[in-house]
Image (cartoon, rainbow, N blue to C red):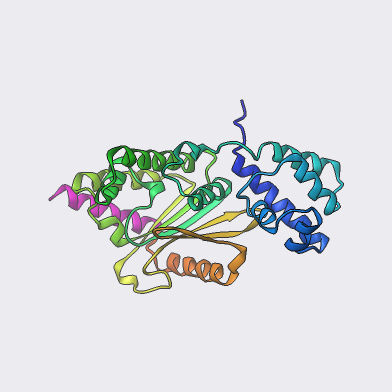
Amino acid sequence: MTSPVDPSLNRRKLRLALRRARERSGLTQREAAELVEWSQSKLIRVETGTVGVSVSDLRALLRLYEVTDQSTVDELVEAARGSKGPSWWSKYHDVVTPQYAQYLGYQGAATSMRSYHPIVVPGHLQTRAYAEALLAPRGLKPQRMKRVVDLRMERRERLLGSTGPEITVVLDEAAVRRRIGGDAVLDEQLQHLLELSGRDDITLRVLPFEAGAHYSTLGSFVLLGFPDDDDLLYLEHAAGSMTSGEDLELLARYQECFHTIMDLALGDTESLDLITRIKQDLGSR
């Protein structure tokens, strides 16, 4: 039985199709919104994929943009019908910000995920014990802590599942040496990384201390790749922020930065050897 398509993926399909149709028609967002008697903010939300689209609203836009191919219309109508309703992370609404929810939607559609992490192992590669130890200093109430960790674990399973993106991760040496949760927790986390590195769809590299400075020395970032759209840049900090076509210069800087980091990082075998040595050192303490 085929799994239902997540509403966020249908919203993304509509976002791309409607933006491109508007651009082909030569209309600005303001002009298009005025012609269908919408507020410009409503059209912007549709074109950013943050809201679903009713079938009647969709048909109004398609008429305006002179999209008449019946197979295209039928496909987009089906996407509009599936653009409403909850996504998988909706049950975590109490711990997911709107910004992060939008990022999760993009992540679900990505075919590649390239990221650099200078301080800790990223959430999508964490074990439960490591995640709990990492969050412990924040002073969260036990129930909220469990909710955040449960979200992180479900996201991990989805990303690492059979339909997840191709993943390339560069970890700074500090991230694999930092004793989050103590020796036992770090040992389990490093073992998890070693096991993941054996998969064909995951590339794991370590950036050694001697590599020196680079553009993103002080912060994590993620580049999501799509077959039908520009890369999306997600800068990881307290609030998180996304950048796609709106700031191509910043996106290009981080794409270049990732290539530089990959060149500076240890090779596949050398990276695994370093993680193995760190793990062995834990056992001898």
- Residue at x 38% of width, y 49% of height: 123
Q: Farthest left residue?
A: 285
Q: Position of residue 186 (x, y in %)?
A: 25, 48
Q: Is residue 221 visible?
A: yes
Q: Position of residue 108 (x, y in %)?
A: 55, 45
Please indicate whether residue 242 sits to the left or right of residue 190 in the image.
right
**Main SS type for the magenta part?**
helix
User: Is 282 inside the magenta-drawn segment?
Assistant: yes
Please indicate whether residue 166 sits to the left or right of residue 227 in the image.
left
Front residue of 276/239: it is 239
In this picture, is 154 found above or below 137? Answer: above
- Residue at x 37% of width, y 55% of height: 269
Please indicate whether residue 266 sits to the left or right of residue 113 in the image.
left
In this picture, is 174 found above or below 190? Answer: below
Front residue of 155/37: it is 37
Front residue of 118/46: it is 46
Front residue of 202/14: it is 14
Q: Position of residue 2 (x, y in %)?
A: 62, 29
- Residue at x 80% of width, y 44% of height: 59
Residue 76 lies in quadrant:
top right
Residue 248 lies in quadrant:
bottom right
Residue 92 lies in quadrant:
top left
Please indicate whether residue 90 sits to the left or right of residue 182 in the image.
right
Total labels: the figure holds 0
Q: Which residues are magenta?
A: 268-285
Quadrant placement of the N terminus: top right
Q: Farthest top residue?
A: 1
User: Is 113 inside the magenta-drawn segment?
Assistant: no
Q: Position of residue 42 (x, y in %)?
A: 67, 53
Q: Is residue 197 visible?
A: no
